[in-house]
Amino acid sequence: MFGKKKIEINAIQDSDLAEALKQTRQYNDLIEGKIHCVSCDTVMTENNIGVIQSQVINGVANLTFYCERIDCVDEFKRKLNE
């Protein structure tokens, strides 16, 4: 509709976020402010996550984060469509 492309969104509930972060060994990094938005470098918190993207690097699962700013979410969408 209106020329927009429909995309499938996989979601994670807030209650499952800590467990997902623990599985990728990123829980402490989030709590300690060591994770940043890949778009704008904002420090990520539990309250400003816009998009979490899963990727495997050298056989290790890792999550990358985009903050909730609309331009950062738009950047994620652009990269997704490349």
Image (cartoon, helix red, strand yellow):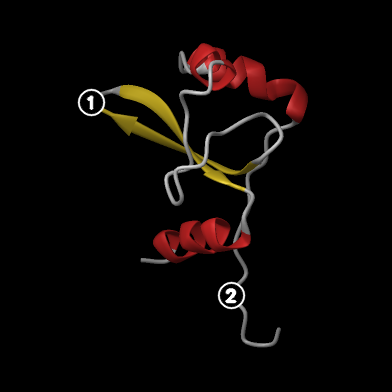
According to the picture, the residue beneath numbered tag 2 turns out to be 5
- Seen from the viewer's position, the closer of residues 41 and 56 is 41
Q: In the structure shown, which secondary structural element does the residue marked by tag 2 occupy?
A: loop
Looking at the rendering, in which quadrant would you find the N terminus?
bottom right
Give the spatial CA distance, label 1 vs label 2.
Answer: 32 Å
Residue at 27% x, 23% y: name it.
59
Q: Mark 1 or mark 2, which has the lower sequence index?
A: 2
- Percent across and percent down for residue 2 are 69, 87
Location of residue 77 with respect to 32 vertically, above or below: below
* Residue under label 1: 58
In the displayed structure image, the side of residue 66 where residue 62 appears, left or right: left
- Secondary structure of residue under mark 1: loop
Query: Height in image: 56 above or below 32?
Result: below
**Whole-percent x and y of residue 73?**
56, 57
Question: In which quarter of the view is residue 46 placed?
Answer: top right
Within 10 Å of the Cα at label 1, are there few (<14), some (14-19), or many (20+) other Cα atoms? few
* Residue ranking furthest to the left: 58
